[in-house]
């Protein structure tokens, strides 16, 4: 399943590259503005500079998440072999605004806690300081591994904010290895984006990656619901992925290097 996921994700991104580039440019321009504003806040010589900087970071991060999450509907269409629309990206901004602000603020707070807490505990020294630092890293890792599923879950299942947050932890603890893999794969995509001036895959490509990953993973739960006799821990690991992704594999079709540049000859 991992191999097919990587293939489908690449093909989906390549075939719909325009629908990734436009949101990425908008998000990158916003990020540049946000860094400029944060830089000015950091330069303030007041006793409130640190808390003010933290609040500004969380607020700007939350607003930026609106632009990121707005691409989820197009990513969902692409993952489902449907036609995306640039107009849909802009239409989604008001629809995702509230959930994106809350989700972005939550992630922003976790980032601030990590960047402040880890150095403080390390500077404390001793066994206690190291233990507290490792504990913080452990819980932060679980939270980030889990919360990465928020946008895909919201796009594919459409639950409320609270229910989606709960589902994030269900998906993580039931698919721990897969969640860790997707997290570091998306981290790799983020690093790759910087090398290509954030044009691709960018945040829109990372959203597409998450939605593709969850969409394929949800086949597992459809199969378990249809075969309740296989819900034991041992049998849950024997998911017939080849059969479950067969239709998607057929829809994607055989792809070779030439087809990416001359699809009419494929």
Image: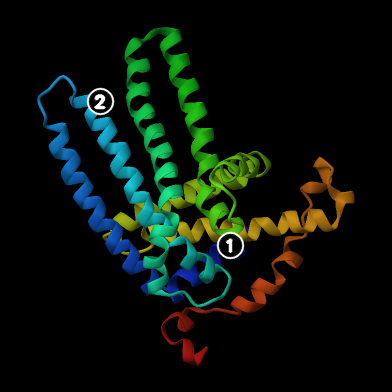
Picture colour scheme = rainbow
Which residue matches tag 2? 51
Local secondary structure at mark 2: helix
Q: Earlier in the sequence, mark 1 or mark 2?
A: 1
At x 54%, y 62%, the residue is: 6
Residue 41, percent from left and from top: 16, 35
Image marks 1 and 2: residues in contact by CB distance under 8 Å: no
Q: Position of residue 245 (x, y in %)?
A: 69, 67
* Left or right of residue 244, residue 144 in this image: left
Residue found at the far right of this picture = 229
Q: CA distance from mark 1 to mark 2?
A: 42 Å
Q: Where residue 240 sits in the image (x, y, percent)?
A: 77, 60
Residue at image position (59%, 59%) is 156
1 above or below 232? Answer: below
In this view, the residue in front, 124 or 98, is 98
Camera-side mark, 1 or 2:
2
Is residue 219 shown left or right of residue 115?
A: right
Split into 4 quadrants, where in the image is the N terminus?
bottom right
Give residue 179's mark: none
Residue 53 vs residue 264: left or right? left
Is 61 left, or right, of 171 in this rendering?
left
The correct choice, above or below, for 23 with respect to 108 in the image is below
Does residue 17 appear in this view? no
Viewer-nearest residue: 221 or 241: 221
Residue placed under numbered mark 1 in the picture: 5
How far from the left and from the top, in percent, is residue 256? 52, 79
- Within 10 angstroms of label 2, few (less than 14), some, or many (20 or more) residues? few
Q: Is residue 168 above or below residue 120?
A: below
């Amino acid at each position: 399943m991992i191999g097919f996921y990587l293939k489908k994700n690449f093909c989906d991104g390549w075939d719909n590259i325009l629908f990734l580039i436009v949101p990425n440019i908008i998000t990158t321009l916003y990020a540049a503005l946000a860094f400029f504003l944060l830089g000015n806040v950091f330069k303030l010589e007041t006793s409130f500079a640190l808390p003010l900087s933290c609040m500004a970071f969380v607020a700007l991060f939350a607003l930026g998440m609106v632009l990121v999450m707005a691409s989820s509907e197009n990513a969902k269409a692409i993952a489902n072999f449907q036609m995306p629309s640039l107009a849909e990206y802009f239409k989604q901004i008001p629809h995702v605004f509230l959930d994106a602000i809350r989700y972005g603020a939550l992630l922003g707070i976790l980032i601030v806690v990590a960047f402040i807490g880890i150095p403080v505990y390390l500077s404390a020294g001793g066994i206690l300081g190291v233990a507290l630092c490792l504990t913080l890293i452990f819980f932060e890792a679980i939270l980030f591994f889990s919360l990465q599923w928020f946008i895909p879950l919201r796009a594919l299942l459409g639950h409320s904010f609270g229910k989606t947050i709960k589902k994030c932890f269900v998906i993580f603890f039931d698919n721990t290895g897969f969640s860790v893999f997707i997290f570091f794969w998306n981290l790799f995509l983020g690093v790759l984006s910087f090398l290509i001036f954030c044009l691709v895959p960018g945040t829109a490509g990372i959203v597409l990656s998450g939605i593709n990953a969850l969409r394929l993973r949800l086949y597992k739960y459809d199969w378990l619901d249809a075969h309740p006799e296989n819900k034991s821990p041992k049998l849950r690991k024997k998911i017939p992925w080849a059969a479950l992704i067969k239709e998607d594999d057929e829809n994607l079709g055989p792809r070779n290097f030439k087809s990416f540049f001359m699809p009419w000859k494929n």
